[in-house]
Image (cartoon, coloured by chain):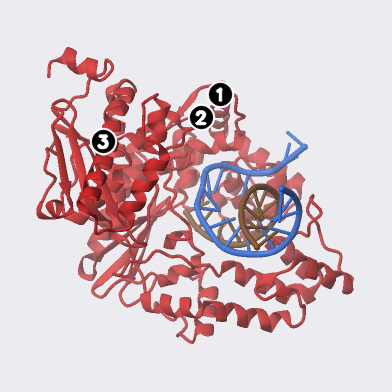
Chain colours: A red, B brown, C blue
Amino acid sequence: MPIEKQATALNGARLPFAEIWMADFEFVVGSGEKPRPVCMVAEEFWSGRQIRLWEDDLQRLKAAPFNTGPNACFVAYFASAEFGCFLALGWPLPTNTLDLFAEHRVLTNGTQFPHGNSLLGAARHYGIDTIGADEKETMRDLIMAGGPWSEAERVAILDYCASDVDLLRPLLASMAPQLTATPQRLGHAIWRGRYMGAVATMEHNGVPIDVGALDVINANWLDIQDTLIVEVDRAYGVYDGRTFKADRFAAYLAANDIPWPRLDTGRLALDDDTFRGMARAYPQVSALQELRHALGALRLNSLAVGPDGRNRTLLSPFRSKTGRNQPSNSKAIFGTAVWVRGLIKPEAGTALAYLDFASQEFAIAACLSRDEKMWRAYESGDPYLQFAKDAGLAPPDATKSSHEAVRDRCKHIVLGVQYGMSAYGVAQRAGILVAEARELLQLHREHYRAFWAWAEQNVDNVLAGATLSTPMGWQFRQGMGTEGNPRSILNWPMQSTGADILRLSCVRLMEAGVKICAPVHDAILIEAPLDALDEQVELARGIMEQACRDLLRGRACRVDAETIKHPDRYMDTKRGLGMWNTVMRSVGLPEYEGGR
DNA sequence: TCTATATCACCC
DNA sequence: AAACGGGTGATATAGA
């Protein structure tokens, strides 16, 4: 197509692709399952050539029936859904992808607008005519019912599928000028598109689960709770079945002359911290505290596990304002309480590796702010202790064990700083006086001056209307008329750049053939045959460190690796072991021992 | 009795 | 005046 005609079709923009294929799938998906493609409509942007295929036609193809090579671009809205269908069909993923959902999120991140982030919402945002949401819902219901569909219904479903593709054309045209504003801008968009492929790959692979143990726990769930409650509540009488009653607890407190802290609303403060504190002064409530704590951690109702024993769930990429994934906490194994991860268990002949970036946000802060002293603290391997030394609170030869108390206070300061914590907040958290917290924060400011100058400049800039951007082009701008939270703004570059690093890592791991199972914000779970584990871990570690170097001016975060070999299970021995064993005891399964 | 809101717990 | 960033979700209580 001649350049001038192309420019007209794209509102003055140019896209450097010979073919642009816009596509949408309809599919059926059950909890924890891979999607089952029902139909696909694809249309080429320049020629208008359209392909409509039904389920059985799709199954017969070994690859997408259109150009997915380097001179073509695939366009979709929330492409991980389309790629989930590609993978279910065994099709290779396209080389280039523009995901208009991801781009819509970038372009509107931080600003409030009324239409939401759905395809229809984005279309309305650009003034494009759409079908009604009701009509869409009716069709979704018809599809999700799973068929069989009459001939007329098939036609209706294909028409509906085509109507979404029809929206992609004007949407692409509306967004194209911004997407192509600079070559770099388009490059970042294509990277986000590649990440949607990695997302689909992780959703496809899933996390292997010990289904036997899960079934036993689920079957005994209510019994476990009842047993725990009945035993303990005998002395209190504050439970009504499985429900803790605040008024009954108030009566108990009155009868026992215990003064209890209240919230501003006048209600009793019932959080775990308050309970712990009060249990120290009034030991008779400590059993109740332990019970409430245990019940709070007992949550694994709706883990999404497919018939093949893999935990699969929508990762919801680019959902948070820092660009992080935001999967459902109840469906995803990494969203549940830590002890539940004991259910993660590699299949026979395989192993898993949990690779995480050590103190990633601290490292990012040091690199982006060019604070050399802060970077040296990171490189020391123990930033908390090094801050103590830098600030003159510990001698140069201090160690983690020789100066545990001061290191612990400094840890709270260092972590709190990244969230914009006040002296009051740090004091609460670290259990020290506000005056001491204030002093420690001041020392942090004095010793990491470059970091503070950078961080405060960011906050000032955003409040003055500027846009923040990560190395890979994720953006944030404070919406007009909305009030910015300075702590949020302060933290944004660190968390968002962490999300960049994760995305870059996932894409390169996928493309290097590493089997990625799940992203966990600053960590990635991978799977490998037992005999290839060590090699795959080193390959992955190298890729993750390189992702840091590429985004952090040549500097790498350390990557810690923990491996789990069949028949062992995953276990967080620090945070999850106690509860895991409590549950195992109450359902009559063996407790955790040496990996099993 | 049903729904909305507040509170709390969990994750990184 | 509040006092920790980004989130999801369950549950108890208040309110219609």
A529 lies above or below A139: below
Residue type at mark 2 is: Thr
Residue type at mark 1 is: Met
Specify few, some or many for label 2: CA neighbours under 10 Å numbering under 14, 14-19, or 20 or more: some
Q: Is residue A585 visible?
A: yes
- Residue A380, position in %: x, y? 47, 49
Q: Is residue A184 left or right of residue A284?
A: left
Q: Secondary structure at mark 3?
A: helix
The first of marks 2 and 1 along the sequence is 2
Q: Residue at x 51, y 64 (%)?
A: A337
Disc 2 to disc 1, C-alpha distance: 7 Å
The first of marks 2 and 3 along the sequence is 2
Q: Are marks 2 and 1 on the same chain?
A: yes
Task: Name the residue that disc number 3 marks.
Answer: A165
Tell us which disc is closer to us: 2 or 3. 3
Task: Name the residue that disc number 2 marks.
Answer: A111
Q: Secondary structure at mark 1?
A: loop
Q: Residue A115 versus residue A352: which sits nearer the camera? A: A115
Q: Residue A260 versus residue A398: which sits nearer the camera? A: A260
Specify few, some or many for label 3: CA neighbours under 10 Å numbering under 14, 14-19, or 20 or more: many
Tell us which disc is closer to us: 1 or 3. 3
Q: How many marks?
A: 3
Q: Is residue A507 left or right of residue A409?
A: left
Q: Chain of mark 2?
A: A
Task: Name the residue that disc number 1 marks.
Answer: A480
Is the C-beta separation of discs 2 and 3 under 8 Å?
no
Residue type at mark 3 is: Val
Q: Is residue A509 visible?
A: no
Q: Residue at x 49, y 69 (%)?
A: A339
